[in-house]
Image: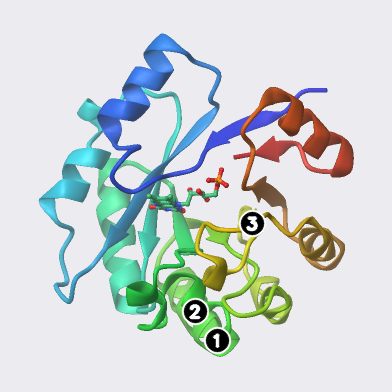
Amino acid sequence: MSFTLLSSPLQGFTEFRFRNAVHKYFGGIDTFYAPYIRFNNKPEISSKYQRDLQLENNIVPELIPQVMTNSADEFIIAVKYIRSLGYKELNWNLGCPYPMVTKKGMGSGLICEPSKIDEILDRVHTETDVIVSMKMRMGYLEPTEILDTFPILEKYPIKSIAIHARIGKQLYKGGVDLESFQRCLDTSKHKLYYNGDITTVAGFRKMQEQFPTIDTGC
Ligand SMILES: Cc1cc2nc3c(=O)[nH]c(=O)nc-3n(C[C@H](O)[C@H](O)[C@H](O)COP(=O)(O)O)c2cc1C
C-alpha cells in the first residue's frame, strides 16, 4: 500500500538544518512542516522564522510553513510573507498545548471557539489566495470539542487536517485516544491525517491496519 509520510514540526528541533540533514542522509519524508511562526505582539515576521523559511536555506522537496495565531490580521501578515517567498500553502496550528499559549486562546486553546475560527477563516479566504491546511488536537479539555468545529471547517476549502490524537491538557503525556480519532474520521468530510505516537515501523503498520482510509501519517 502506498502512503505519504509527513514530518510533523517540533519548534526548536526541526528547523532548516535538521530538515536538510534528514533529507540528505535518510530520505523518505514526502513533506516537511516548518515549526510555527508566532507573533509576539509585533506585526512582523521575526528574522528567526525568515531564516528558517527562505528558499535558499531549504533543500527538501516540499516544505509547508505553519502559523500559530488567533488573529486574522496576523494570519494575513503570515500569508503575505510566505506568498512573497513562493509558498502556496500555510498550515494553521490549533494543536499547541502549552498553557502560556492556550490561556491566550491560541493553539489547542482555540478549538473550543468555533465562531472565532470561522471569523479568521472567512477573512483569510476572502482576502488572500492561500491554501489553508490545519494541525489540530481533538480539544483542550475534552476530545469532543473538535466535533463542533467540523461544520465550520466544511465551509472552507481546507486542504487537509492533521489530527494529533490527544487533547491539550494532556500535554505530551498519556497515550493517544484512537477511539476519539475514529469519531473524527466518521464525522469530518475533510481529508484527515493521523499524528501521534508513531515510533516504530510496526506501530506505523498497525495504524495503517486500524485506519485503512488514511494514506498519510506524521
Ligand atoms: C518540543 C516540541 C515542539 C513542537 N512544536 C510544534 C510546532 O511548532 N508545530 C506543530 O504543529 N507541532 C509541534 N509539536 C507537536 C509535534 O509536531 C507532534 O504533533 C507531537 O509531538 C505528537 O507526535 P508524537 O506523539 O510522535 O510526539 C511539538 C512537539 C514538541 C514536543
Q: Residue at x 34, y 59 (%)?
A: 79
Q: How many other residues sit within 10 Å of disc 1, few (<14), some (14-19) or many (≥20)?
A: some
Above or below — where is 35 with respect to 107?
above
Residue 60 x %, y %: 39, 24
Q: Quadrant of the N terminus?
A: top right
Q: Residue at x 56, y 67 (%)?
A: 170
**Along the horizontal axis of the image, is 126 left or right of 71?**
right
Residue 125 x %, y %: 49, 70
Return the residue at label 3: 163
Along the polypeptide, which appears first: circle 1 or circle 3? 1
Return the residue at label 2: 110
Return the residue at label 1: 113
Along the polypeptide, which appears first: circle 3 or circle 2? 2
Above or below — where is 197 with respect to 45?
above
Marker disc for residue 123:
none
Q: Residue at x 66, y 39 (%)?
A: 217
